[in-house]
Structures are given as structure tokens and as C-alpha cells.
Image: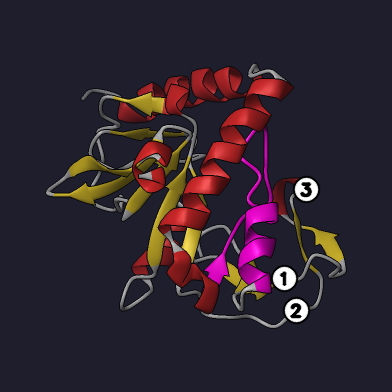
Amino acid sequence: MENLSEWRKHQRKQLIAAREAISDEVHQQWSQLISDFLKQGFPKLQKMTIGIYWPFRGEYDPRLIAEYFRQQGATLALPEIINKNEPLCFREWLPDAPMKNGAHNIPVPAEARTVRVDAVLVPMVGFDRHGYRLGYGSGYFDRTLATYQPQPLTIGIAFEILRLENIHPQPHDIAMHYVVTEAGIFHTQNHALTPVATLQDSAE
């Protein structure tokens, strides 16, 4: 594709605008469904160190479900941008931890220890049917994941209105292991997102 960066920039702008336009009531409904899927579909998170994120511009807020996992035994961590071209640093986070403003005025733990994450809940501006994510364009998550061997479990989080046909991934782009939306859990297999579960399946 010619001028992929311009195309992505345009998609990013449209998708963020669509996300910010969601009503509070609908956002709450969709968020509750995502939380339920995370709780039902990923019990192993209860024993892991989980990287989460501070919600930004209408994103799903992972803090409540993360607190549920913490109460079951998980350790939580928030990412911090150290330098522009370096991987993210994950710092242990507790709900009452002292915070400071990091890059883009996003809060980060003030003086917490750095941890190595076993799983990451990854915010997505958009995503495609192959399991690739459209982020904010700075490449922090891809750079960070590339430094991990083995890879942490990656769970991309987004609403269905942010689904694209193809984000035209580049060699450095890393597909998510799973994507969770208000419609269900999807697993990336053979370069395709495959539905794993719905609330109806879980109830049966």
C-alpha cells in the first residue's frame, strides 16, 4: 500500500473519534461484557503478573477487572515510557499507589519496582481480522514485546466498531494472541481471528 503511514494516521483519527462518540451507557454495557469475558476466559491471569494500561480517550477501563485478578493473587503493573525509542518499563501498581504524570499526561506509579510481565492487556485503537493491532503510532508495545523471550500472553482489548479488514501489518508488527471485544473472545490462529467463546457458550 502506498503511503501506509498516512492511511494509518487517517484510520487512527476516525477510530478514536468513533470511540469517543460512544454514549456513557453503551460504553458501560460493552465494558461490562469485556470484563465478563476476561474473567470467564482467562482464569490463569489470577496467578500472573499482568501489564494493564491507564484508560485514554474512551478506551475500555481495565482497572476494575484487574483489581479482581489482583484479589485472586495476580500482580498488576502499568507501563511507563522511559525514552522515545526504548521499550516500555512496567512498574508494579496497586489501586492506592502514589502516581505521577508520565508521557501524554498518563499516570504511572511514582516509585514502584519494575516487574517482568507474564501477560499484557493491550489497548487497541483498531484491529484486523488477522489479529494485528493499530496503536497510536509510536510502536512502544511492539518494541517491548520484541524484547521478551518467551512472549508474554497478549490480550488486545477493543470495541467491535474498531474492527478493520486489514491494517496492513509491517514486519515489526506483532499479532495479539487473543482479542477481546464486547462480542466475545477471539484467538489468533493461522493468521486469522477465530471466535473462542461467547457469554451464551459459557452459560451452557
In percent of width and height, residue 166 lies at: 25, 29
Q: Amino acid at mark 3?
A: Asn
Q: Nearer the viewer, mark 2 or mark 3?
A: 2
Question: Can residue 152 be seen?
Answer: yes
Cα–Cα gap, marks 2 and 1: 7 Å
Query: The N terminus is located in which quarter?
Result: top left
Sequence-wise, the earlier of marks 3 and 1 is 1
- Evaluate whether residue 80 shows in this view: no
Q: Which residue is mark 1?
A: 93
The reply to whether dot 2 and dot 1 touch (C-beta < 8 Å) is yes
Q: Residue at x 39, y 47 (%)?
A: 202
Query: Judging from the image, what secondary structure is the residue with disc 3 in?
Result: helix
**Within 10 Å of the Cα at label 3, are there few (<14), some (14-19), or many (20+) other Cα atoms?**
few
Residue situated in front as seen by the camera: 1 or 121 = 121
- Say which of marks 2 and 1 sits in front: 1
Residue numbers of the magenta segment: 49-71
The disc placed on residue 105 is 3
Neighbourhood count class around disc 2 (C-alpha, 10 Å): few under 14, some 14–19, many 20 upward? some
For marks 2 and 1, the one nearer the N-term is 1
The image's mark for residue 112 is 2
Residue 90 place in picture, x, y as percent? 60, 71
Foreground of the two, 87 or 157: 157
Query: Which residue is at 63% across, 80% downward?
Result: 114
Mark 3, mark 1: which one is toward the viewer?
1
Instruction: Determine whether, in the image, residue 29 is placed left or right of residue 97.
Output: left
Residue 126's place in the image compared with 187, above or below, is above
Q: How many marks?
A: 3
Under mark 2, the amino acid is Ala
The residue under label 1 is which amino acid type? Trp
What is the secondary structure assignment of the residue under circle 2? loop
The secondary structure type at the circle numbered 1 is loop
Label 1 CA crowd tier, 10 Å (few <14, some 14–19, many 20+): many
